[in-house]
Image: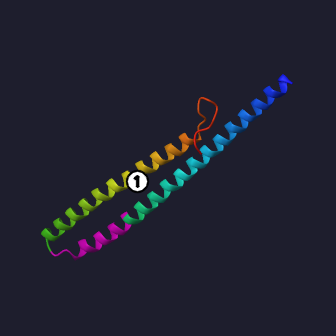
Amino acid sequence: MNTLITQDAALQAWKRQLDASLRMIEALTEGAERLHATQLEAAAAAHADAVATQGAAAQAKDAAALTQLQIQWLRGNAEKSVAYWRAVYENAMQTSREIAACLPTPGGDEAAK
């Protein structure tokens, strides 16, 4: 009888570990999908801005207008860069929290799902 309890406990521990591993894989996959969406959105916006800036540069009448265009372009890119990296950081933190929630606690119970 003692052997059965030990085998049952080992089987339950194995199931908990497998379940936690699968939930971690799911959290990582969802985090990667969010990151990919952020990257695609940023790339599409950067391309659209480049096309618009190219058109505006072609229309510039003098050096002052071109300089003003460049300043606006640089300022916009700096703001978008900060927003992009903030989104990447927030995604990383969210994914990290989701993974941590999958880990078993020292008492053998799992953290909140």
Where does residue 91 sit, x and y in percent of width and height?
46, 50
Quick one: label 1, few (<14), some, or many (20+) residues within 10 Å?
Answer: some
Where does residue 53 sit, x and y in percent of width and height?
28, 69
Magenta segment, prevailing SS (helix, strand or loop)? helix
**Image point 52% across, 51% down: which residue?**
31
Where does residue 107 sit, x and y in percent of width and height?
61, 29
47 or 112, nearer to the observer:
112
Say if 28 sits above or below 66 in the image: above
- Left or right: residue 108 compared with residue 35: right
Quarter of the view holding residue 63: bottom left
From this viewpoint, which residue is outermost toward the top? 2
Question: Residue 52: within the magenta?
Answer: yes
Q: Which residues are magenta?
A: 46-61
Kind of residue indicated by mark 1: Ala
94 or 61, nearer to the observer:
94
**Image point 34% across, 70% down: which residue?**
51
- Left or right: residue 47 compared with residue 113: left
